Image (spheres, rainbow, N blue to C red):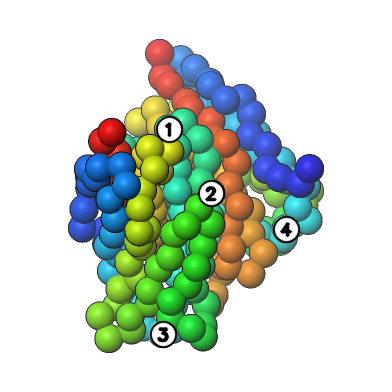
Amino acid sequence: AQSVTQPDIHITVSEGASLELRCNYSYGATPYLFWYVQSPGQGLQLLLKYFSGDTLVQGIKGFEAEFKRSQSSFNLRKPSVHWSDAAEYFCAVGKAAGNKLTFGGGTRVLVKP
Amino acid sequence: DGGITQSPKYLFRKEGQNVTLSCEQNLNHDAMYWYRQDPGQGLRLIYYSQIVNDFQKGDIAEGYSVSREKKESFPLTVTSAQKNPTAFYLCASSITYEAFFGQGTRLTVV
């Protein structure tokens, strides 16, 4: 069965500093990988996705992620965080059958002034 | 504007009651999903439907029921058999593998 692990439950970062959120997945074939962001009490917004091709993926809001097959990872990065980046971030993997997504437990990001 | 509408935003249920959460989409997506979100547990799949008049159980379907009579609508009923229904419920629809989410319904048992 596929699974997604986000090792960091909480991360605190200073405004202007860089941010990296870790995501490791377990899946037997080429995965479809996603990062979503959720503000409190809201739905999820897609930041970026990886299906195939270039392993460095650019997304919205200045985020990027790198797919590393050898490490089964899809880490999310942002060079300089803004206070508005404070939210919860979810990594997800999809499989070929059923279009279902499996989500990680999420990482809550706090931004210090 | 195209999107997914969930209603109500907040819902209160008494013990032993069934309640129905609404989810409507105008994105013309075939697939729709219901997820439950609890703090620290991410999103867990309750039910999903890939086509009208067909749906499958997800990982935590016990105590829930759904219907898919129209492409645009995928209501979720939380029955009295669900022993711990207090949670945030998210509806989504998808084309290929990219899911689009509604704003959620927060259900509280009182």
Query: In this rendering, which labeled residue sits more in front, label 3 or label 1?
Result: 1
Residue under label 1? A40
Query: Gap between marks 1 and 4, in whole Å?
Result: 26 Å
Residue A29, percent across and down? 41, 85
Of residues B70 and A71, the one nearer the viewer is A71
Q: How many marks?
A: 4
* Tag 1 subunit: A
What's the residue type where badge 3 is placed? Ala
Residue under label 4? B29
Residue under label 3? A29
The quarter of the picture where the N terminus of chain B appears is top right
Q: Are marks 4 and 3 in contact (CB under 8 Å)?
A: no
Instruction: Mark 1 or mark 2: name the one nearer the start of the chain.
Output: 1
Instruction: Mark 3 or mark 2: name the one nearer the start of the chain.
Output: 3
User: Do pointers 1 and 2 mark residues of a single chain?
Assistant: yes
Residue A26 visible in the shown view = yes
Q: Are marks 3 and 1 in contact (CB under 8 Å)?
A: no
Disc 2 residue crowd, few under 14, some 14–19, many 20+, Cα 10 Å: some
